[in-house]
Amino acid sequence: MNRIDKTFKNLASEGSKAFIPFITAGDPTLNITHSLILKLESAGADVIELGVPFSDPIADGPSIQKASLRALENNTSLKDIIGMVKNLRKDTQVPIVLMGYYNPVYKYGVERFVVDAVKSGVDGVIIADLPPEEASELTNPAKEHGLATIFLIAPTSTPDRVKLIAEASTGYIYCVSTTGVTGAREKVSDTLAPMVKLIREYTDKPISVGFGVSTPDQAKEVAKMADGVIIGSAIVNLIEKYKDDPEEILTSVEKFASSIANAIKR
């Protein structure tokens, strides 16, 4: 049982839900990312998704695309990110999930990536453009070394595909709340509740909802349906707003994250 499994088990025993913030590693620098992770944990984050910057992030909207570009301009590499997580483990045991695309992992070497990630203290991975049917090159070594592999279920997924993805996912299932790319939305999709209900027909694994959740009220609404609430673009927007003021980045993100965590925990 890795840190993700332990976290969801503990939250379930308390009748609570997980707050899962997303930030892009290296935006605006890896040192600030390190500090942000510690601030997010102190603000109430239960799991942290850490974006691996990529030049063609097809599942992401403008906010995270720009964050990836800023990180790449700083020459942030997958190797650098794994090294940062290793350093982080001196200060925190919060579960960390790397989220990105298959190209950097393939270039790194899939099995080497799994081994190095686990040794550094990474708990899980989400590869947005890797369907479970084509993922054995990743899932086999991940299973052997204890790295959770989290797959995405979209609103357009058929019941058969929901079943397939639910069976393939470990750690938690990433439920995409709405069609399209990442980004803040004005309201929670009406299709979310029936989609979560459908997923629960096939699995008792934790279900976390992302894409579009951006306010405390939305987070509270989603927490009534799901086991975890993922918030990315709203946090990334704050980082962009204060990208030239590291102290303000930390202060504003911690304040916003606390408001989200409080809404979810209530």
Image (cartoon, rainbow, N blue to C red):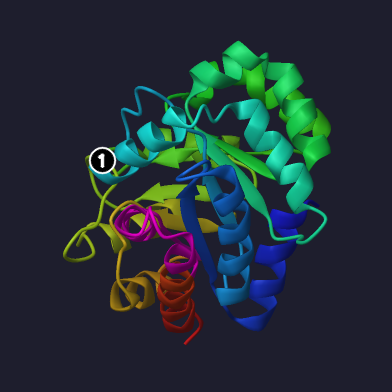
Please name the residue shown 24% across and 41% down the image.
Answer: 62
Left or right position of 56 against 3 = left
Q: Give the residue drawn at x 26%, y 50%.
A: 183
The secondary structure that dominates the magenta segment is helix
Q: Amino acid at mark 1?
A: Gly
Q: Which residue is mark 1?
A: 61
Q: Nearer the viewer, residue 224 or 72?
A: 72
| Camera-nearest residue between 18 and 56 | 56
145, above or below 32, in the image: above
Stretch in magenta? 228-250
Inspect the magenta stretch and tell me whether residue 245 lies in it: yes
The x and y percentages for residue 132 are 52, 26
Q: Can residue 203 be spotted in the picture?
A: no
Residue drawn at 19 percent across, 62 percent down: 190
| Camera-side residue of 123 and 88 | 88
Say above or below: 209 vs 98. Answer: below
Q: Is residue 242 magenta?
A: yes
- Horizontally, residue 212 falls left or right of residue 161, namely left
Please determine whether, in this image, residue 225 is positioned above or below residue 198.
below
Residue that extends furthest to the bottom in the rendered view of this protein: 266
Q: Position of residue 128 (x, y in %)?
A: 44, 32
Residue at x 25%, y 49% (from the top left corner): 178
x and y percentages locating residue 73 in the rendered image: 42, 29
